[in-house]
Image (tube, rainbow, N blue to C red):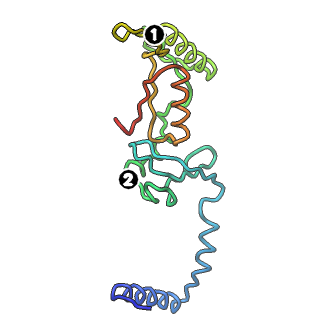
Amino acid sequence: MSMNRRQWLKVTAGMGAGLALADLGVNVQQVHAATRGMKLNGTAEFTSACNFCSCGCGMICHVKDGKLINLEGDPDHIINQGSLCSKGAAMSAVPNSPQRIKKPMYRAPGSAEWKEISWDEAYDRIAHKMKDTREKTWKATEMDGDKQLVVNRTDAIAFLGAAQNTNEECYLITKASRLLGTVNVEHQARL
């Protein structure tokens, strides 16, 4: 086995550190066993993606009693390999902010006040507005010179993807947009 100077220095330094720890009486197996039991007891672990830019860095989130208590980069993620930028590292402030709105709010036209509504009411309002918009702006045909072309679309509805969407979610967003008859699909990565 041949070894260059740099590899020899690494091996020598590693062996020296190991001998020093062993001489001090440090048992590495006991240290690993002790820390394994302490790491975030009673938390649920979830993976997520950062939504601050279009990179889509992977994050590991630890949640306890419905509150995010730890956030770190995902070392198994292909993009960031465990590291986070300053914005991503500060992401834990977003879900824990007292200013975060957690229920649907509605402000009537001309009103200055927001009122809380139920999720069912919010879904119904969105569905009715999308259906009304689609019906009012539907184009079945379009003239191209002297030819009449079948287009079957609406230009009044658009979809926007974001960095935290997975490939599968982006695929479903695209399918939903086509189902509603719009070709206006954009993604945060291009903006």
For the point 39% across and 84% down, which residue is it?
10
Viewer-proximal residue among 41 and 163: 163
Residue 144 place in picture, x, y as percent: 36, 11
> Which quadrant of the figure contains the N terminus?
bottom left
Q: Check disc 2 and give the amino acid type.
A: Cys
Question: With respect to residue 67, does 116 lie above or below?
Answer: above
Question: Neighbour class for label 2 at 10 Å: few (<14), some, many (≥20)?
Answer: few
**What residue is shown with label 1?**
141
Residue 191 place in picture, x, y as percent: 34, 35
Q: Secondary structure at mark 1?
A: strand
Q: Secondary structure at mark 2?
A: loop
Question: With respect to residue 138, does 78 lie above or below?
Answer: below
* Separation of marks 2 and 1 at Cα, in angstroms: 49 Å
Question: With respect to residue 148, does 5 lie above or below?
Answer: below
Viewer-proximal residue among 30 and 174: 174
For the point 39% across and 43% down, which residue is it?
54
Mark 2 or mark 1, which has the lower sequence index? 2
For the point 41% across and 31% down, which residue is it?
186
In this rendering, would 124 be left or right of 173? right
**What residue is shown with label 2?**
85
In this rendering, would 110 be left or right of 26? left
* Numbered circles on residues, count: 2
In this rendering, would 132 be left or right of 5? right
Residue 91 place in picture, x, y as percent: 44, 46
Quadrant in the rendering for residue 7:
bottom left
Q: Give the label on residue 107, or none.
A: none
Quadrant in the rendering for residue 53:
top left
Residue 23 place in picture, x, y as percent: 51, 92
Question: With respect to residue 55, does 29 lie above or below?
Answer: below
